[in-house]
Image (cartoon, helix red, strand yellow):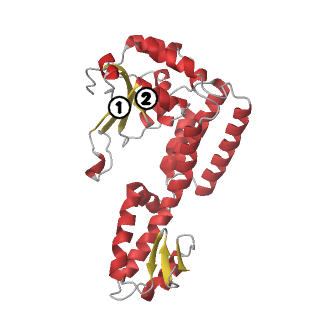
């Protein structure tokens, strides 16, 4: 599937929805893995950090289909660094062997035995900062992107209709966006009124055609997920499902020091329904608030260490050589 020679492939496993039990017929296959850099590459300080292989390149402009495969394989040293930071993808890979069919051909049986003996509670700390940051960013960042994209689209639409100055349509744009955090009038440093669209400011007396280009670039930057969020009324339901899943995994880690995949059937069904937009936005917010409280309560009784055991992590890597 992926050639990492002259290094040694240790683990290849399903990731994403195929691992969590939330896959739909349109889901692609995400694969994560670990390799052991050769001694020579370490001695010469040429050891790679990761290998990637994607059947649908990121610059293709098309969304992954069900038959697409994305592979990322980390060096075991880099993987351990990610684990110590609580990186969500690294944590998921750590517990991938709990899934009865997640481990893929090419994985090393000896490494899997060592992995089974590894104590996750010594590698992961109570902070779980990477996981919490991911959960927050998914719910907040992407749920707003649809509204942000809409504001930019309104601005570009009206600016394209005038051959004169920005000021001719500025107040119309502000009124239609109806959110002064996204579009408003400000006074610039030269005491000139400006139209502010998100972080972009345009003088009222600037040419409308000139203002179009940076706004079109801003629209492009929001990408496909923002467009889907806009189609769903400004909410990225897939991002909400990610947030809820990660918060539940944090709760399980605090309580038990480990996660088992796939997720329990009832929870997996709930995540799929959220991704498909079957739940109301207000209900999703209530779910997230409740899950945050559960995580906070679990953290108070966490089985995880205040700080990861670095000596234990180093010993694990050294044992592989």
Would you say the residues marked 1 and 2 are in contact, meaning their CB atoms lie under 8 Å apart? yes
Horizontal arrangement in the rendering, residue 239 relative to residue 18 (left or right):
right
Q: Is residue 88 above or below residue 138?
A: above
**SS label for mark 2:** helix
Q: Is residue 63 above or below residue 122?
A: below
Q: Is residue 61 above or below residue 17?
A: below
Q: Position of residue 44 (x, y in %)?
A: 31, 23
**Distance in Å between CA atoms under marks 1 and 2:** 8 Å
The residue positioned 62% from the left and 30% from the top of the image is 252
Label 2 neighbour load within 10 Å: few <14, some 14-19, many 20+: some
Horizontal arrangement in the rendering, residue 148 relative to residue 284 (left or right):
left
- In the picture, the disc for residue 78 is 2
- On the image, numbered disc 1 is attached to which residue? 50
The residue positioned 43% from the left and 75% from the top of the image is 154
Horizontal arrangement in the rendering, residue 107 relative to residue 255 (left or right):
left
First-in-chain label (1 vs 2): 1
Label 1 neighbour load within 10 Å: few <14, some 14-19, many 20+: some
The residue positioned 74% from the left and 33% from the top of the image is 300
Q: Nearer the viewer, residue 76 or 236?
A: 76
């Amino acid at each position: 599937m992926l050639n990492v020679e002259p290094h040694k492939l240790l683990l290849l496993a399903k990731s994403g929805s195929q691992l969590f039990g939330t896959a739909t017929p349109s889901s692609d296959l995400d694969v994560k893995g670990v390799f052991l850099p050769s001694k020579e590459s370490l001695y010469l300080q040429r050891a790679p950090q990761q290998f990637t292989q994607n059947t649908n390149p990121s610059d293709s402009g098309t969304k992954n289909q069900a038959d697409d495969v994305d592979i990322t394989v980390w060096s075991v040293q880099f993987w351990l660094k990610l684990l110590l930071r609580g990186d969500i993808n690294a944590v998921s890979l750590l517990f991938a062997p709990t899934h009865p069919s997640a481990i893929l051909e090419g994985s090393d049986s000896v490494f899997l035995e060592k992995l089974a003996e590894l104590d996750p509670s010594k590698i992961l700390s109570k902070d779980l900062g990477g996981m919490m940051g991911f959960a927050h960013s998914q719910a907040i960042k992407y749920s707003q992107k649809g509204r942000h994209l809409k504001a930019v689209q309104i601005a570009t639409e009206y600016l394209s209709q005038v051959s004169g100055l920005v000021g001719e349509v500025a107040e119309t744009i502000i009124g239609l966006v109806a959110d002064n955090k996204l579009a408003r009038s400000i006074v610039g440093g030269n005491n000139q009124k400006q139209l502010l669209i998100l972080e972009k400011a345009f003088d009222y007396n600037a040419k409308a055609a000139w203002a179009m280009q940076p706004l079109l670039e801003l629209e492009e930057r929001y990408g496909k997920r923002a467009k889907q969020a806009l189609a769903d009324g400004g909410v990225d339901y897939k991002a909400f499902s990610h947030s809820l899943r990660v918060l539940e995994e944090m709760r399980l880690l605090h309580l038990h020091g480990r996660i088992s995949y796939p997720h329990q059937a009832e929870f997996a069904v709930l995540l799929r329904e959220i991704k498909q937009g079957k739940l109301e936005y207000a209900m999703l917010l209530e779910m997230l608030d409740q899950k945050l409280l559960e995580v906070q309560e679990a953290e108070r009784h966490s089985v995880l260490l205040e700080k990861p055991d670095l000596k234990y992590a180093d010993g694990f890597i050294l044992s592989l050589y």
